[in-house]
Image (cartoon, rainbow, N blue to C red):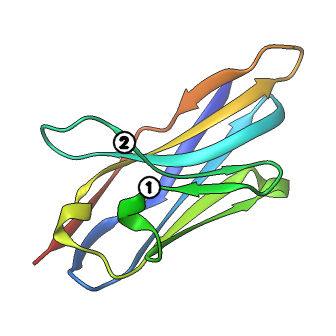
Amino acid sequence: QVQLVESGGGLVQAGGSLRVSCTASGSIYSIIDMGWYRQAPGKQRELVALTTSGGITNYADSVKGRFTISRDNARNTVALQMNSLKPEDTAVYYCKANLVPTRSSVTFQYWGQGTLVTVSS
């Protein structure tokens, strides 16, 4: 069994900072990439930031220069540091990993349960 567990999030005023983290645990052979998505009320889920095992990162245009994704391969952890937060960043943030479980040759996609980030104006 593989699980993604998120932590962090909460309420912050506009201009403030928050950090969310996600740890993948269980029978994992290798992690291809890990990333963060978000879903605001009434909107579709969208990519926020992604990092591959090789260190390649990708950010949504709306968060470039404000958010930083980092990954600890040894601990199967990915974090998202969010600075200069805006009310439009309010959403449920989900961690996602594409990984290969042990005793498998197939890549599967796993999602965390989500953590709410609320930015007040």
The disc placed on residue 31 is none
User: Residue 28 at x, y = what percent?
Assistant: 80, 31
Q: Which residue is mark 1?
A: 60
Query: Residue 117 placed where, x, y %?
Result: 29, 61
Judging by the rendered image, the residue that carries numbered circle 2 is 46
Residue at 67 percent of width and 31 percent of height: 98
Residue visible at 20% across and 81% down in the picture:
14
Describe residue 8's horizontal placement relative to residue 50 as left or right.
left
Contact flag, marks 2 and 1 (Cβ < 8 Å):
yes
Disc 2, SS: strand
- Secondary structure under badge 1? loop
Q: Kindly report the distance in space between the C-alpha atoms of the residues bearing marks 2 and 1.
A: 9 Å
Residue count near mark 1 (Cα–Cα under 10 Å), binned few <14, some 14–19, many ≥20: few
Front residue of 12 and 57: 57
Q: Is residue 82 above or below residue 97?
A: below
Where in the figure is residue 26, as x and y percent of width and height? 74, 33
At 19% from the left edge and 63% from the top edge, which residue is drawn? 88
Q: Position of residue 35 (x, y in %)?
A: 57, 47
Residue 24 left/right relative to 30: left
Categorize mark 2 by other alpha carbons within 10 Å: few (<14), some (14-19), many (20+): some
Q: Residue 90, relative to residue 114: is it above or below?
A: below
Q: Quadrant of residue 3?
A: top right
Amino acid type at image mark 1 = Ala
Please state, as top left, top right, bottom left or bottom right, where the N terminus lies in the image.
top right
Mark 2: which amino acid? Glu
Residue that lies at the very extreme toward the bottom in this rendered image: 15
For the C terminus, give its image quadrant: bottom left
